[in-house]
Image: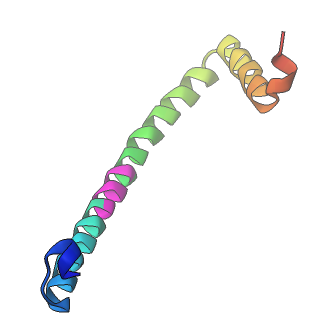
Amino acid sequence: MQGENGQKDPKMVTHQYSRIIDEDRIRIANAMNDDFYRKDERKSEEEELLSAVKNNPELFKQFVAFMSMTKNPANNIA
């Protein structure tokens, strides 16, 4: 290890890499936390879209047509 990284003993190696793991753990935890709270925002966007579709039958028909195209894209080749 000393030749590659400059650490003179195993304690220095474990100290260095233990911090990296903690930093990764914190970064991942923060990303998961951000994603969790964004789901709340997405839920209100989904509710808004659902309300718009319920209140507009033509929009509902367009939405159903779009969803059927995405489920079977092979049928949409011109």
Q: Residue furthest front?
A: 3
> Could you say where residue 62 lies in the image, as x and y percent from the top left?
71, 15
- Pick the residue in front: 46 or 75: 75
Q: Quadrant of the N terminus?
A: bottom left
Q: Quadrant of residue 77?
A: top right
Q: Say above or below: 69 vs 3.
A: above
Q: Main secondary structure of the magenta part?
A: helix
Residue 14 appears left or right of 74: left
Image position of 63 (left or right of 36): right
- What's the residue at 85%, 25% (across, down)? 74
Please check the rendered image and state whether residue 32 is part of the magenta-colored stretch, yes or no: yes
* Residue at 33 percent of width and 61 percent of height: 28
Range of residues picked out in magenta:
28-35
Q: How is the image coloured?
A: rainbow
| Residue 66 % position (x, y) | 72, 21
Please, is residue 20 above or below residue 44 in the view?
A: below
Residue 15, image x, y percentages: 16, 82
> Viewer-proximal residue, 77 or 19?
19
Q: Position of residue 78 (x, y in %)?
A: 84, 9
Judging depth in this view, the residue of 73 and 1 nearest the camera is: 1
Q: Taking the image as drawn, is residue 19 in sight? A: no
Q: Residue at x 23, y 70 (%)?
A: 20
Residue at image coords 74%, 23%:
64
The reply to whether the magenta stretch includes residue 78 is: no
**Height in image: 37 above or below 54?**
below
37 or 31, nearer to the observer = 31
Badge count? 0
Q: Quadrant of residue 70?
A: top right
The image quadrant of residue 29 is bottom left
